[in-house]
Amino acid sequence: MLGFRDPVADAIGLLRPRTVIGPSLRAAGKWALRFDTFLHVRIGGLVRGTCWLILEGHEPVLLHEGDTFMMGNPPPYVLAGTLNASPRPAKQVLAGAVDGFVRIGPESEEDLYLCVGHIAFDDRNAALLTDLLPPLVIVRVDDPHGGRLAQLIDLLATEVGLTAAGGPLVQNHLAQILLVHMLRAHAARTDRPTGWLGALNEDGIGSALRALHADVAHSWSLKELAQISNMSRSAFAHAFKNHVGVPPLEYLIHWRMSLARDALTRDTLSISELARATGYRSESAFSTAFRRVVGSSPAQFRNQVRQPAHSAANEN
């Protein structure tokens, strides 16, 4: 059985996040760093000072102490102390980090402390999150969620500066907690459908989503889910699609297939076992649904993901 509890925890767990924190930046004077485009999520915040964040195709944004930001699959961007500074390639500058820090300008004059991290996901399911995010989310320190996020950034920055036992583990967990709080802040103030993020702030829809995730093999009906949400079927179907972006039973199918891709990648269940675990009475019904969503049969998908691992083993 595939056992799950909470839509947010389940989705992030399925993404298999890998976190790289830092190096953090301490700077003074006139400076600017250009970052190339990258996949998945970059997250960070200002522990001290101010700086400009200039995302390609967007107006420059001035970040203040305590502000946090999150970028999903962003285009190239610049972080700068002033708008008229000539950017240097960030990769070259960050390569000179010492003890988790990069310093620009005289240490005695430093007026900026920026803590950043990169969270990468399993490529096969990364779209579960990245498709829901805009290129840039900024949470100001005076936002209802801002104070908590500023505290997390401060804790993360403190851990970067320590050499205590378990430091990387603490940094990894803090970064993932920061990610969840940033997602909550984003979901609370957007009018666009937010997929499984809709479970973060909607009690009725959240109850239905939690029920789906708690028993993914159940033959759910629209009537059952509406009853769990204490809504009529028509009201529930409308509210679910409005918040999540797709009808309830379509969401269920896509979630089942996300679980199936993960299980096939890890080769933890046979195809017949996986069919039963995801609510299908026969292997052929499961295979038909999988092919419709993924574009290949379960067996073809499993063979494709096995090939790179087999090639790597032969090279070694």
Image (spheres, rainbow, N blue to C red):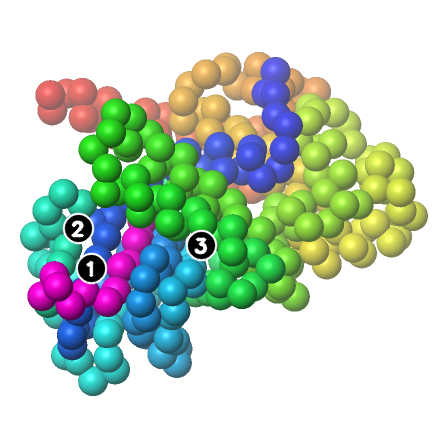
Residue kind at label 2, given as amino acid type: Phe
Q: Which residue is mark 1?
A: 26
The image quadrant that residue 124 belongs to is top left
Tell which circle, 3 or 1, labels the residue nearer the N-terminal end: 1
Answer with the quarter of the image where residue 11 lies.
top right
Determine whether, in the image, residue 314 is placed left or right of residue 187. left
Quote the CA–CA distance across marks 3 and 1: 17 Å
Q: Secondary structure at mark 2?
A: strand
**Horizontally, is 92 left or right of 132 in the view?**
left
Q: Which three-letter amino acid code belongs to the residue tagged 3?
A: Ala
Judged from the image, the secondary structure of the residue bearing numbered disc 3 is: helix
The answer, for residue 7, to whether it is visible in the render is yes
Residue 90 appears in which quarter of the rendering? Answer: bottom left
Residue holding disc 2: 101
Residue at numbered disc 3: 150
Residue at 49%, 38% (x, y): give it: 12
